[in-house]
Amino acid sequence: MKKKLLSMALVAMMVAAMFSACGKKESTGMTVNDGVLTMATNAYFPPYEYYEGEEIVGIDADIAKAIADKLGLELKIEDMEFDSIITAVQTGKADMGLAGMTVTDERKQSVNFSDSYATGIQVVIVTEDSDIATVDDLAGKKIGVQLATTGDIYSKDDFGEENVEEYNKGADAVMALKQGKVDAVIIDNEPAKSFVKANEGLKILDTEYVTEDYAAALNKDNTELLDAVNKALAELKEDGTLQSIIDKYIPAE
Ligand code: GLN
């Protein structure tokens, strides 16, 4: 009886292996669908990802393209709410989340993170005439954030849920600040800079809120892809490609 069960299990495993081999490419050692590396992102996060006409461009888009090239894969970018990226990676809808995403212990429960490729800083945007001068002055103020980002998570912890207004896009939080619906916006420094540049009457506080690491999010089961992405990232760091991509989008001040 035991033997029979064992052989049935073996057959099941073989069938499963045959099916999973269909339509997948494993020439580079990792499993992705049909030679396409699908990247999930939220394309409202300049200069990491944003629309230029119909096309999604930015630091993450260029890095993903360079990684895909190294792995001999075609890159496809899927734009979605920031909040959906981790689920997309978990369910296999996307192979990789690349979205200026901060490595956190909580997210590590759901996905694997690659080595870090950039540093992010949570900063505070206020209106030029604001009486808020430091992070401490935020106590009791209304804070606008982008839903499910670290700015959202940390500010709810530090300043109370009732003081935090969540918006789907960073730009919507910034608009609310301009309209006086919130007193400050907490968001990553590079998007903050481009929002302040695009909108008059805003400034970024000198005091920084939190410093964090950005990395690619990958499916927990696809450790081959994790290794391949880390190897590609290491090469891109080594040969200066990564720095030149960053310099292209973040001009030296
Ligand atoms: N770095 C922030 C986070 O990971 C925001 C990322 C984003 O909005 N794209 O939560």
Image: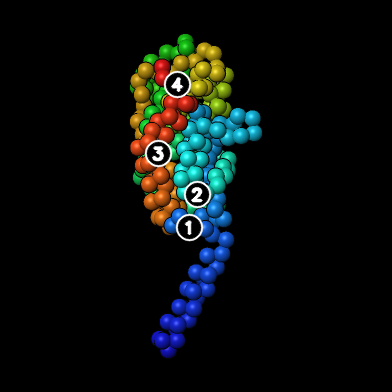
- Tags 4 and 1 touching, CB below 8 Å: no
Report which residue position mark 3 lands on: 236
Asked whether residue 149 is in view, the answer is no
- Tags 2 and 1 touching, CB below 8 Å: yes
Q: Quadrant of residue 190?
A: top left
Q: Secondary structure at mark 1?
A: loop
Q: Residues within 10 Å of mark 2 (few under 14, many from 20)?
A: some
Closer to the N terminus: mark 4 or mark 1?
A: 1
Q: Which mark is residue 72?
A: 2
Report which residue position mark 4 lands on: 251
Q: Secondary structure at mark 2?
A: loop
- At x 51%, y 37%, the residue is 61
Q: Position of residue 82 (x, y in %)?
A: 52, 39
- Tags 3 and 1 touching, CB below 8 Å: no
Quadrant holding the N terminus: bottom left
Q: CA distance from mark 4 to mark 3?
A: 19 Å
Q: Secondary structure at mark 4?
A: loop
- Work out whether residue 64 or residue 87 is closer to the camera in this orientation and state it: 64
- At x 49%, y 74%, the residue is 14
- Work out whether residue 195 or residue 67 is closer to the camera in this orientation and state it: 67
Q: Amino acid at mark 2?
A: Gly
- Name the outermost residue toward the top: 129
Report which residue position mark 1 lands on: 27
- At x 38%, y 28%, the residue is 121
Quadrant holding the C terminus: top left
Q: CA distance from mark 2 to mark 3?
A: 15 Å
Q: Is residue 40 above or below residue 21?
A: above
Closer to the N terminus: mark 2 or mark 1?
A: 1
Depth check, mark 4 against mark 1: the one in front is: 1
Q: Position of residue 240 (x, y in %)?
A: 38, 33
